[in-house]
Amino acid sequence: MTNSQDPILRDLMRLAKAPVTRRTVLAGAGMSAAAVTLAACSPGGAKHLSPVKDLSSSQHVVTWDDWPYYMDDSDNPQSPTIKGFQAASGIKVVYNTNVDDNNSYYARIKNQLGQGKDTGADTMCLTDWMAARLINSGLVQDFNYKLLPNVTKNLDPYYKGAAWSYDPDRKASLPWKGIIAGIGYHKENYKKVTGQDAPTSVADLFTNPALKGKVVVLSEMRDTIGVMMMADGIDISSFTADDFHNTLDKFTSYVKSGQVRGIKGNSYVDDLKNGDAVAGIVWAGDIVSTNNELGKDILGVVLPDSGSTYACDNFLIPMGSQHAANAEALINYYYEPEVAAMLALGGVFYVPPVKADLVKPLVAAKNSALASNELIFPTDLSKFHQFRPLSAKEDNEFSKAWSDAANGVV
């Protein structure tokens, strides 16, 4: 257990009591993603853009757009880690929780972004598939790795290479946090309803009649369908349109039969807590947050042998950033193991991109249970797989089909 008398840790750990997570706001936007189609979003001809003049040497400020509740003090724009960076660097941080959804955020900045003008942010954190779109469209700039020594030393090698095909060498994107999707369940209620201690496979959710009307899944298409495709032996890094639609047909049948009671964002946690749902496809970070909030492990997560989806929200620097060097100083700071540990201790229960052997001992010194949690510091990364990037045509087609399948289910 933690030392409640440690004032720094006390200030950090009190933040972990909040049940709201990075995905809370996404919950409200997930089902409307199809309405904001991306076919018309990728501005043509952007490949010719170049970075604007950098004013970092004379203007000691950086503006960072991020998701809500993704910082060690989600209610305070001057969190402990932000204050630490400002004190060490002399650079003022304007931290905005402006990213409530990849699509809606992009729609708000796309005109400036496409013209290489200032979007209002020097860096922003967006999910892999949107990061891929911006990189492929030439809308973001490469990093100056001379300003990123901590990244060079401390980035987990897992985040480089062919699995991250949109940026295998991490020239223009760097992971901020990793997001795991797996099978979640209410421990007591699952035992009561099924007679089993825990689900053992994705099929358990959809084929066990005892769970009819008690299964909830994520409104994020890439996670729910991704987990289901892997359960059918499909490689989600190279699936075909037929693979997607065949799996979606199965999902639709589970919805129509009443096996699935809800398709939700973060609010699925409430369904699990109050007993309306017993199990489902979930985000692991939410489960850790909920158990921490309640002070007891009422919910569990199973990472299926067939595989769990894994995605990152990534730092990007738009071509129009006027303070790119300051943004790189900020990114470099968050790749310090001590800072990564502060975030974990401060209630950001998602996977750090910094090498675990550098961060875990620091966390363990304050909270051994947190350090040993496989959902924050997983030891077997081979179970995680990335949903392949979609073309604009595929994105529109798949998002519409997903929206149609989920129509009327809340």
Image (cartoon, rainbow, N blue to C red):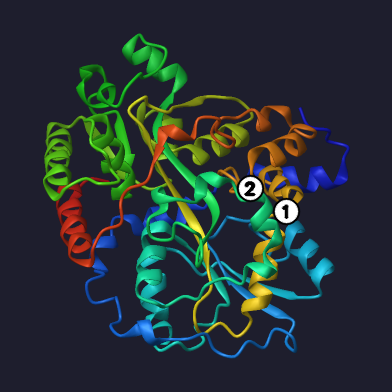
Q: Considering only order in the chain, which callout, 1 or 2, is on the residue closer to the N terminus?
A: 1
Badge 2: how crowded within 10 Å, few (<14), some, or many (20+)? many
- Distance from disc 2 to disc 1, alpha carbons, whole Å, reads 8 Å
Q: Position of residue 32 (x, y in %)?
A: 28, 61
- Name the residue carrying label 1: 336
Residue found at x 52% / y 24%: 298
Q: Quadrant of the N terminus?
A: top right
Closest to the observer, 9 or 236:
236
Name the image quarter holding residue 195: top left
Q: As drawn, is 164 to the left or to the right of 401?
A: right
Residue 145 rendering spot, x and y as whole percentages: 63, 67
Q: Which residue, given by chain and number where applicable, does mark 2 sit on?
A: 354
Type of residue at label 1? Glu
Q: Is residue 79 left or right of residue 27?
A: right
Q: Residue at x 65, y 70 (%)?
A: 328
Res. 111 in view: no
Which residue is pictured at 36% across the width and 82% down the height? 47
Amino acid on which the number 2 mark rests in the picture = Val
Question: Marks 1 and 2: in contact by CB < 8 Å?
Answer: yes
Dot 1 crowding, Cα within 10 Å, few <14, some 14–19, many 20+: some
Q: Residue furthest top?
A: 195
Is 211 rendered above or below residue 112? above
**Is residue 304 in sight in this rendering?**
yes
- Residue 257: x and y, percent? 13, 31
Question: Could you say which quadrant of the image residue 116 lies in?
Answer: bottom left
